[in-house]
Amino acid sequence: MRKSGPTIADVAQLAGVSSQTVSRVSTGAENVRSETRARVLEAMSKLGYSPNHAARSLRNGTFGALGLIAHRYERTGETLITSGVIRAAEKHGYTVTLLSIDTPDDEHWQQAAHLISNQAIDGLIIVRAEQASPSTLKLPARLPVAVSDSRLMAHYPSVIADQVQGTMDATTHLLSLGHRTVHHIGGPPDSIPAQIREATWRRCLEVAGATPPPVLRGDWTPRSGYLLGRQLCQDPTLTAVYVANDEMAIGLIRALHEGGRRVPEDVSVVGFDGITVGEFIHPPLTTVRQDFSEIGHGLVELVLGQLRDFDLSLPFRTVIPTELVVRCTTAPPRP
C-alpha cells in the first residue's frame, strides 16, 4: 500500500540521523546540536514532512501546546507578556495557541471557555482578563492554569509585577522633590493594575499628609493621556503627575507642551511600564519599569510546574520586582 506522506524514518534517512533525533527536533528539544538541527529541518522541508502532534498526544498524553488568552493583544502590556510567554514556551519545546476576547462580557467569556475546552492544549495562561470570573470562565477541572492581573488570581496560581512598590517609588520620588501633592491619571476602572496603582498612590499621599487631587481615568492609550492632559493644563496648582502607564504619560507631555507648561520645569511627570519609546521621547520619561518578559516566563513555569505535578497550593503568587528609572521628566517645583 502506498504511504500517505513522508514519515519520520524518511526524514531520518535523508538527514543521516536517527529517528529519535528527528523526534527531538520536531518537539523543540534543546539537546540537539545546531548543525544537526539544521540538517533535519532541511530534510523536513524537502520532503514536506510535518510532525504529527495528534499521534504524539496519543503516545505520551500531551499536545506540546499551551493556550494563551487575553482581552486585547494590541495593548502594549499584553503584547510584551505574550512575547515573553512564547519565548519561554519555545525553550521547553511548546508552541502557543492564542485565543482573543474582543468584548469582555459574560457571553464572550463563556464562548471562550467552550473554545478552550476543545483546544489541543496542555495548559492555559490568562493575561489581564479583567472581567473574567470562575462563573463566566468555566474551565476544564484538571487543566493547568496560570493568570496575571485578573480577578482570577484568587483562584489560580499567578504572576504579577509589584504594582504597590512601583507606585510607592513613583509617588515618593515626586514628594521627595518637594511637590506638595501629586495628581494621578489612572487606567480604566475595571483594570486590576489600575485599581492597585490608584489605591497605593492615594495611600502614599495620605501618609505624607498631602491631599489627593481628583483622579482622571484614561484607557491606557496616548490619546486618552493627551485629552486628560488638556484638562490638567487648566489647573494652576498642577506641579506633578503620576500616570498609570507610559503611553498615557507621553500623551500628557504633549498636552502640557501645547498648553505652555514645560516638563519638568513647570510640571513633573512619572509613568509606569518602562516601555522602550519612553527613553527616546523629549524629555526622556521617568518611569517605573516592570519586566514583562519575566512575567511571561513565570507564567509558563507555573503551568509546566502543574504538568509536572508540582504542588502549587493557592494562593500561590509570584511577584516580580519593579524598578524606578529616573530620567528627565521630574524635578523640584519652581519656587
Image (cartoon, helix red, strand yellow):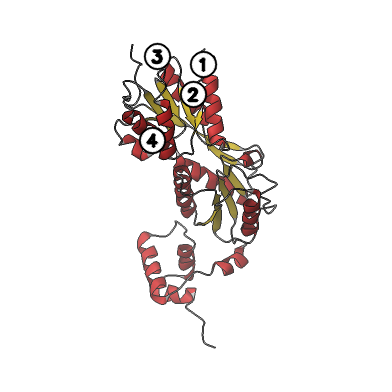
Left or right of residue 304: residue 261: left
Residue 31 spot, x, y in % from top left = 44, 57
Q: What is the spatial separation of the Cα atoms under label 4 and label 1, in whole angstroms?
A: 25 Å
Using the image as rendered, state which of residue 44 and residue 236 is in the foreground.
236
Determine the secondary structure under disc 1: loop
- The residue tagged 2 is 168
Viewer-closest of 205 and 58: 205
To which residue does mark 4 refer? 251
Residue at 55 percent across and 52 percent down: it is 102
Q: Secondary structure at mark 2?
A: helix
Q: Amino acid at mark 1?
A: Thr
Q: Nearer the viewer, mark 3 or mark 2?
A: 3
The residue that mark 3 highlights is 178
Residue drawn 41% across the image and 16% down it:
179
CA separation in Å, label 3 and label 4: 24 Å
Q: Could you tell me the amino acid type at mark 4? A: Gly
Q: Position of residue 137 (x, y in %)?
A: 66, 49
For numbered disc 4, what is the local secondary structure? Answer: helix
Name the one closer to the observer, 329 or 315.
Answer: 329
The answer to whether residue 26 is above or below residue 289 is below
Q: Identify the mark nearer the N-term, 3 or 2.
A: 2
The quarter of the rendered structure image containing the N terminus is bottom right
Residue contact at pointers 3 and 4, CB within 8 angstroms: no
